[in-house]
Amino acid sequence: MSLLEYNEITEKKYIVLDGSPYEVITSHVFRKQQRKPVNATKLKNLMTGKVTEYSFHQSEKVEQAEIDEREVKYLYNNRGEWWFSEIDNAGKRFKVTEEQVGPQGKFLKPNTEVSQLLFKEQPMGFKMPITAELRVTEAPPNIKGDSAAGGNKVVTLETGATINAPLFVNEGDVIRINTETGEYRERVGK
């Protein structure tokens, strides 16, 4: 168990606050006029998925959370239930809620391997791949002259997620997506 100073609480770190594990989403150390510096953070509770804002003062220390990971395989989702299994034993299945999976879950294809995060042997969330390559299943047709001004259109992916993509992306294309932001990155093939 290590303690972090107020200025060591930075993005992507895991901390324990009031007995619950949190992931630091953003942090900004600043000084208000003649006062002592503070670290204004946004924290995501890894058990509930709720995001809160918290300011750490110079004198505060916080415990760094010891998060374990285990590899699991995503199987399918149905009516808000997301089903996973152990990698080497498909018979050992378990379900989680949509809130536990998070917004990146809409980019998961069946049989994708992800890391499940555990805090004191209790499951709490997932670490998703940062990029995903998905096939476009629906894309509105281009109209001649549209591309002169640039622009985007909404396309539907094989997982059912919709994103904004450039006008040249067509149905059947495989595109790479940043799962953290939900943004189009590039076209990788047909």
Image (cartoon, helix red, strand yellow):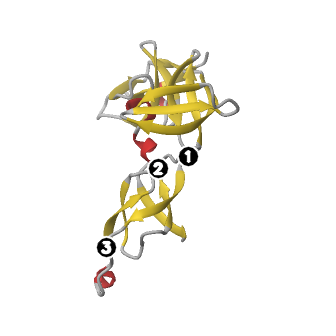
Quadrant assignment, res 55:
top left
Give the residue at x 48% y 57%: 177
User: Can residue 26 be seen?
Assistant: no
Q: Amino acid at mark 3?
A: Gly
Q: Which mark is residue 179?
A: 2
- Please report whichever mark, 1 or 2, sits nearer to the chain's N-terminal start: 1
Q: Which residue position is annotated with label 3? A: 151
Circle 2 crowding by C-alpha within 10 Å: few under 14, some 14–19, many from 20 = many
Q: Residue 173: percent from the left, percent from the top?
A: 49, 69
Quadrant assignment, res 111:
top right
Name above or below for residue 163 compared with residue 61. Answer: below
Do labels 3 and 1 touch, CB within 8 Å? no
Circle 3 crowding by C-alpha within 10 Å: few under 14, some 14–19, many from 20 = few
Give the residue at x 41% y 13%: 18
Q: Amino acid at mark 2?
A: Thr
Image position of 174 (left or right of 97)? right
Q: Secondary structure at mark 2?
A: loop
Q: Which residue position is annotated with label 1? A: 129
User: How many numbered marks does the figure carry?
Assistant: 3
The quadrant the N terminus occupies is top right
User: Can residue 182 be seen?
Assistant: yes
Label 3, label 1: how far apart the Cα atoms are: 27 Å
Foreground: 71 or 88?
88
Q: Which mark is residue 87?
A: none
Give the residue at x 53% y 41%: 128
Quadrant assignment, res 64:
top right
Foreground: 86 or 133?
86
Label 1, label 2: how far apart the Cα atoms are: 7 Å
- Please report whichever mark, 3 or 1, sits nearer to the chain's N-terminal start: 1
Image position of 90 (left or right of 154)? right
Foreground: 45 or 94?
94
